[in-house]
Image (tube, grey):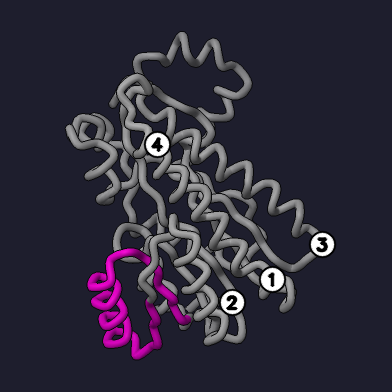
Amino acid sequence: MNERLKGKNVIITGASSGIGERIAYLVAEQGATPILLARRYDQLASIAEAIKNRYNNDCFFYQVDVSDTKSVLAVFTEILDRFQTIDVLVNNAGFGVFENVVDANLDRMKSMFEVNVFGLIACTKMVLPRMIEQNSGHVINIASQAGKIATPKSSVYSATKHAVLGFTNSLRLELMETNIHVTAVNPGPIRTRFFDIADESGNYAKNVDKFMLDPDKVAWKIVKAMLTSKRELNLPGWMNAGSVFYTLFPRLVEKVGGKAFFKK
């Protein structure tokens, strides 16, 4: 058992499926109290009940659309009234749509920023005063390797993840004189339902299937990093090495590896 997490309160957005759901089970297994947030009430209720039955552990859940600022304010106010400490916030809620800019729908583009960026910032702002007051805590933002190296058909999604990385790095500096940790998680493609929306054709998921990350392993690495000073969690390592090389030699990477970018 991870003694760091025993008795801690862990908020997870986007907790109704994917790595958010898996993180919820894992933190409960470690003796923490999961506080689950997502739009799908029935799914949250089912997960919370399963966690209580499996681990004999408290699990709380709240229905919220993180893109709705008023809803975020109301739900987090209720959470802060209920819990004396907030130890970890995992900003996991997010979605992507893979399409060329010329074909992109403006409303859907706006929605991506509202969920992936503004929703993440709104949730963070709600817990920061409490974390600063208690001089402890951990904000974990699920970004993406797409925030480090953009590819065709992911321009808007990549832009949101670039924004998440910029926000995360700045926030870390703002909190440098405190005991609050800030971590960016940058995974490559993960085998989850994310691609049901992002890749309706199924072509991308098929093309990169052998490179897809196991969601259970990703979730476990995130949980292991909780309440540590880890700056970034980059998965897989070889993909992050590629993004570093791209930063140093962008023209060369685009010329030599161009075909690899067109998997969507």
- Whether residue 47 is situated above or below residue 92 in the rendered picture: below
- Which residue is denoted by mark 4 in the rendering? 109
The image quarter in which residue 48 lies? bottom left
| First-in-chain label (3 vs 2) | 2
| First-in-chain label (4 vs 2) | 2
- Which residue is denoted by mark 1 in the rendering? 129
Q: Is residue 19 visible?
A: yes
Q: CA distance from mark 4 to mark 2?
A: 32 Å
Q: CA distance from mark 3 to mark 2?
A: 19 Å
| First-in-chain label (1 vs 2) | 2
| First-in-chain label (3 vs 4) | 4
Amino acid bearing label 4:
Met
Q: Is there a contact, CB below 8 Å, between mark 3 and mark 1? A: no
| First-in-chain label (4 vs 1) | 4
Quarter of the image with the C terminus in it: top left
Q: CA distance from mark 4 to mark 1?
A: 31 Å
- Which residue is denoted by mark 2 in the rendering? 86
Residue drawn where x is 55% and y is 81% of the image: 8
- Which residue is denoted by mark 3 in the rendering? 177
Q: Nearer the viewer, mark 3 or mark 1?
A: 1
Q: Residues within 10 Å of mark 1 (few under 14, many from 20)?
A: few
Q: Residues within 10 Å of mark 4 (few under 14, many from 20)?
A: some
- Whether residue 236 is situated above or below residue 8 in the rendered picture: above
Residue drawn where x is 78% and y is 66% of the image: 178
Of 83 and 77, the residue lying toward us: 77
Q: Is there a contact, CB below 8 Å, between mark 1 and mark 2? A: no
Circle 1 SS class: helix
Residue drawn where x is 44% and y is 55% of the image: 67
The image quarter in which residue 41 lies? bottom left
48 in magenta: yes
